[in-house]
Amino acid sequence: MDKNYDITVEQLKEMLESETPINLIDVREDYEYEDDNLGAKLIPLGELPDRLDELEELKGQPIYIHCRSGARSGRAKDFLIAKGFDDVHNVSGGILAYRELENQ
């Protein structure tokens, strides 16, 4: 079974509200993170290849990646899978969809 599936913002919200620690990575730029964030570890997409060592200890654990809309995090997910990570999840819709869900 493929463990590298996308998750919805509803699923992410449930995880964050459960207060169980999760490995959440934000691949947006610094200025985007400063403007609004979900408390994730910030590793901008362009820095990901040079900062892989920071994620090495997470191999084999679920990693959830988000960005603004889901496009950059989708690329980050593919990159991490190619580098041997095997439990990587893109948050579909990104922080935009997450904030929209909160405002419903």
Image (cartoon, rainbow, N blue to C red):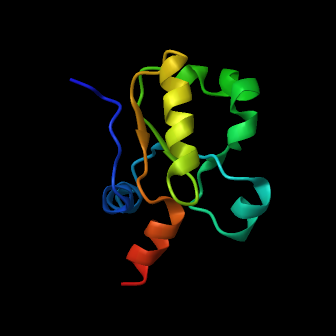
Look at the picture and state if 59 lies above or below 30. above
Q: Is residue 6 left or right of residue 97?
A: left
Please tell me in which quadrant of the rendered image residue 12 appears: bottom left
> Which residue is at the far left?
1
Percent across and percent down for residue 34 are 75, 64
The mark total stands at 0
Residue drawn at point x = 56 percent, y = 21 percent: 57
Q: Quadrant where the N terminus lies?
A: top left
Whether residue 91 is situated above or below residue 86 in the rendered picture = below
In the image, what residue occupies the spot 44% across and 60% down?
93
Residue 24 visible in image: no
Q: Is residue 15 left or right of residue 80?
A: left
Residue 30 visible in the picture: yes
| Image coordinates for residue 72, horizontal then vertical, percent | 58, 46
> Which sits in the foreground, 14 or 31?
31
Q: Quadrant of the C terminus?
A: bottom left
Up/down of 28 relative to 58, above or below: below
The residue positioned 50% from the left and 30% from the top of the image is 78
In the image, residue 76 lies at what x, y percent? Answer: 56, 36
Q: Position of residue 10 (x, y in %)?
A: 32, 63
